Image: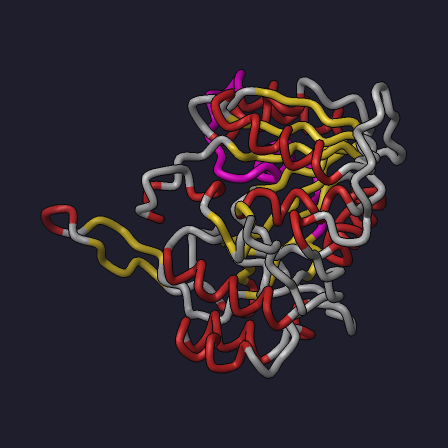
Amino acid sequence: PGSAAVGVLQQPRRGANAAGSSTALAAAAFGGGCAAALRAGAAVVGGGPRRRPLRAGGVGRRGRVALAAGSQGAGDVGVVFLSAGVGKRMGAGMPKQYVKLLGREIALHALEVFLDCDVKEVVIVCAEEFRSIFQDYLAKRGNVKPIIKYAVGGNERQDSVKNGLDKITAEFAAVHDCARPLVTKDEVERVIADARRHGAALLGVPTKATIKRADPGKDGEAMVADTPDRKLMWEAHTPQVVRCDLLREGFAHAAKNKLAVTDDVSLIEFLGKPVKLTAGEYTNMKVTTPEDLAVAEAILRSRGYEPPAAV
């Protein structure tokens, strides 16, 4: 479900916590469709660690401590949290990231993961009209350790990333699409560790489907050009973590050469620098359609997530 970048890259050996550890629920969702995932959802636990159950108001056991003025985040990583997209495919009359997923906005599910990680700062890139959604949630949640900043979105994804990056002071930037609300803390920590070793890394999973490269035929009809080796194909996820000086160099190179990209590490690839593929979970899906929403609900319930009580 959803759109994804696919890279033709050599598949590294995967360990016990890699993409292959995803459960039958994820396999059903991405191999057998939404209905199969929903049937599996009640019985299995999705990839990655369980999230702490949250209760009324979404604050759980964290308490209702007010945001500390001038509080300082730790760590060498800043998060560029992308929440400026339009998301018309959801058909909800609002950007998809603000649709409720089990009582909480999709974007807030994603944000919660990073608030639980050891990051220095989070730059929320969003339209000003939706900024209050984050401000109200953070004030109610309390005990927010990272420094929270805001930036406006741009015309294209890479413009929004650049706007967020301009406010990052940490050594590394982790860019995350908030339409991926099911990423786990374990995934985030592993891709950050790989970026520290290699300078750039992204979460991804080996593609299950056979990919066809298309060329335009007569009257612009799509015709098969060739079939890449599936063993070398990966589906790109987020977060994508890059050393900030390297990412800024990539943006400068793209601007100079008028390059357009749809993900962040492509900027590093254009520089000829290495990018590490960190094996993630198939459950780290992009929620873009009503069908995706149903699958995401099943995965959250299987992890023991408790929706906030209705007010």
In the figure, 116 relative to 124: above or below?
Answer: below
Q: Does residue 230 appear in this view?
A: yes
In the figure, 33 relative to 246: above or below?
Answer: below
Residue 16, image quadrant: bottom right
- Quadrant of the image for the N terminus? bottom left
Q: Tally the marks.
A: 0
Magenta stretch: includes residue 160 = no
What residue is at 41 percent from the left and 38 percent from the top? 95
Question: Viewed as shown, does residue 87 lie left or right of 307?
Answer: left
Question: Viewed as shown, does residue 7 lie left or right of 71?
Answer: left
Q: Where is residue 230 in the image (x, y as percent from the top left)?
A: 50, 68
Q: Where is residue 15 in the image (x, y as percent from the top left)?
A: 78, 71
What residue is at 71 percent from the left and 43 percent from the top? 274
Q: Nearer the viewer, residue 201 or 282?
A: 282
Q: Which of 156 and 258 is in front in this view?
A: 156
Q: Position of residue 21 (x, y in %)?
A: 69, 74
Q: Where is residue 76 in the image (x, y as percent from the top left)?
A: 86, 33
Q: Which of 87 and 268 is in front in this view?
A: 87
In the figure, 267 relative to 227: above or below?
Answer: above
Identify the magenta region.
Answer: 255-276
| Extreme residue in the front direction | 311
Q: Does residue 13 appear in this view?
A: no
What residue is at 77 percent from the left and 30 percent from the top? 121
Residue 24, image quadrant: bottom right
What residue is at 54 percent from the left and 24 percent from the top? 254
Task: Give the colour scheme of this rendering.
Answer: secondary structure
